[in-house]
Amino acid sequence: MTVSYRQPGVVLTDHRFTVPLDHDRPTGESIELFAREVVASDKAHQNLPWMVYLQGGPGFGANRFVGRQAWLDRALKDFRVLLLDQRGTGASTPANRQTLPLRGGPREQADHLALFRADSIVRDCEAIRPGLTGGAPWTVLGQSFGGFCTVRYLSSAPEGLSAAVITGGLPSLDAHADDVYRAAYPRIERKVAAHYARYPQDVERARRIAEYLLQHEPVLNGGYRLTAEAFQSLGILLGGSDGSHRLHYLLEDAFVRTPQGHALSDAFQEEVQGLLSYAGHPLYALVHEACYAQGGRPTAWSAERVRAEFPQFDAAKTLADDGPLLFTGESVHPWTFETDPALRPLRDTAEELAARTDWAPLYDPARLAANEVPVAAAVYHDDMYVDAGHSLRTARAVQGLRTWVTDEFEHDGLRAGGPRVLDRLLALTRDEV
């Protein structure tokens, strides 16, 4: 049953679909997907082409827009848009510490989560597309991890696509997770250096907070254990257009004076809890490294192992050497499953996933080399989350793919640039630029 309702300038229709948990076993267990259809009010009865939006992550449900916000305003000029909650996210049969025990123990939970990568997401899209479009292909818009899914789409089911638009999400076709993080840590270091150049007063502020955490390791109101390493991971903010400013404002009033001396303020702790907790998106932590896994090699906590090759990120060593504290970025570590109460029950499951070796290939280089789907991708020049060098190498491997390389935006260009970014990329798919 579908339900339609209105917001300013749009008509919304909620859809729920039943798809196989494992598409290789179509008569086996099924799961439910949720997606929200959005169409401009004045075009609600027109036979418009469809665009399906694949959110970044993994682990995040689709945007909950109000009206015609951000890039959606541009999309609605040409398309009927489907905002899909990818499997395990949002309202699509959520996978988290509350639901995963229904699968059994850690081994069974890991087997279940192995079906929540880009390959399964694309097969979900192909399962629901014919009923929505009448069999016609649609345009896919993939942001970040959604771009990874889009390249998988081009590899496995290009017949379902009329065009593909990717923003900050061209993955390496063959890099192991180790290669991804070896490229990532130097980028993160550059972002931190740029932040300190903008806000030099934050050098001492960050050091003072880290020193306090090494001595006290407070437990936040929600049960999160705030370690120095967890504090460093706030550097994930530096990959966004306003992230440096947000980090600065967070650091500037971290301490208050109490009868026992200076302590981290309740306001600081509350904001940090919201930024660091995975309660709302646990799949991000669970399958993040698995997004890169293929070729029979385990990820084996890649970000943690590779970090050891960059000792300048060690907080204790930094404080002892009187250097600036380096924040980290988009990485998941074993300690993540100890500090966060939303993840602690899933630590053994995460270990199972990290040790797994039977990952199927995600991309088909031969098929991509013969691609006939119009594709355009925004590559952000110094993207902290997705290596631009990896992205451009992939762009050269996909026949007909047109890139827009820009340093005007960070990784969240689709949000920050809104209609202008989408308009530029759609024009590229139509050879209008």
Image: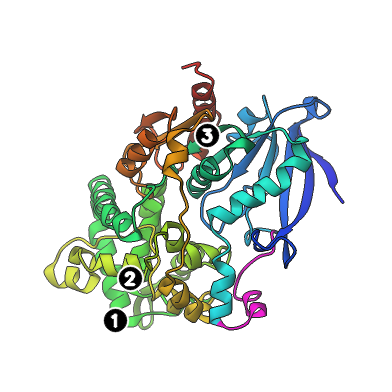
Q: Where does residue 383 sit, x and y in percent of width and height? A: 35, 43
Give the labeled residue for mark 1: 215
**Local crowd at mark 1 within 10 Å, few (<14), some, or many (≥20)?**
few
- Of tags 3 and 1, the one toward the viewer is 3
**CB under 8 Å between callouts 2 and 3?**
no
Q: Which residue is mark 3?
A: 165
Magenta stretch containing residue 116, yes or no? no
- In the shown orientation, is residue 199 left or right of residue 231? left
Query: Residue 389 location, x and y as percent?
Result: 30, 41
Q: Is residue 13 above or below residue 375?
A: below
The residue that appears at 75% across and 36% down in the rendered structure is 133
Mark nearest the camera among 2 and 3 is 3
Amino acid marked by disc 2: Glu
Q: Viewed as shown, does residue 30 lie left or right of 371? A: right
Among numbered discs 1 and 2, the one appearing first in the sequence: 1
Identify the residue position indicated by label 2 in the image: 229
Residue 405: horizontal and vertical position, in percent? 36, 31
Is 94 magenta? The answer is yes
For the record, the magenta segment spans 92-105
The Cα atoms of the two marked residues, 2 and 3, are separated by 36 Å
Q: Name the residue at 44% across, 79% down.
A: 338
Amino acid carrying mark 3 in the image: Val
Q: Is residue 144 visible?
A: yes
